[in-house]
Image (cartoon, helix red, strand yellow):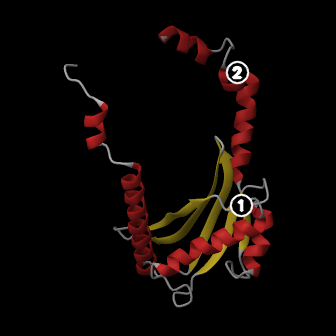
Amino acid sequence: IGFKVDSTKLGKVVPSRRTIARQEKNLMVDCLLHAVQEMTKDQIKYLFLIVDHGKRNGIEHFVKLVRWGGLDEKGNRVIKQLCLDMDMSGHTAKSAADAIKHSLKKLEKAGLNLDLVTVIPSGVTGDAGGGAAVQHIFPLLINCKVLGDAATIINCQMHGLNNCLSSALIAAFGDAGINHNNVEEIEGRRWA
């Protein structure tokens, strides 16, 4: 295309890992402060917690989301959400409960007083696999006062819905449709 790029020139314009990590931390703080401002403006009474622990490509992650009801800029009722954080936590229900409690404290540190605005984490959802399965961490979250006594547990429906469709597709086309004479593969070969 008419110009050469060497590693020295490239290194001068690409931010370092340290710079990228610092920018991601700053963005997370901005998102957290904005979410707490929204929660306060919405005068939330209930906070819903969604968690999922998994291991993809050898990397463990424990994702914690919070959702609440509020109003958008036009005054319409909407559901808002924030990804509190992702960490490795551990393989036990206790370590997962401790990680959730630690993550919720970030909301308090950002200025949301859970006592004054009558925020009661009202429920938790997650999948049913592993030590951090929702049925294992739920009682621990109530015992350590992360969830209120009236909290509910909801099993994750996404896995059930995905498996129904996945099983049907694998039966019809094979795993990812590879090496089967089906419409998708024939169309793919046509354009290859």
Residue receiving disc 1: 90
> For numbered disc 1, what is the local secondary structure?
loop
- In percent of width and height, residue 86 lies at 57, 59
The residue carrying pointer 2 sits among few (fewer than 14), some (14 to 19) or many (20 or more) residues within 10 Å by Cα, namely some
Q: Is residue 46 above or below residue 76?
A: below
Does residue 153 appear to the left or right of 75 in the view shown?
A: right
Residue at x 54% of width, y 63% of height: 85
Badge 2 amino acid: Phe
Badge 1 amino acid: Gly
Residue 7 seen in render: yes
- In percent of width and height, residue 10 lies at 29, 36
Residue at x 40% of width, y 79% of height: 41
Does residue 37 appear to the left or right of 63 in the view shown?
A: left
Q: Which residue reaches farthest front?
A: 8
As measured in the structure, the alpha-carbon distance from the residue carrying label 1 to the one carrying label 2 is: 37 Å
> For numbered disc 2, what is the local secondary structure?
helix
- In percent of width and height, residue 73 lies at 34, 68
Q: Quadrant of residue 180?
A: top right
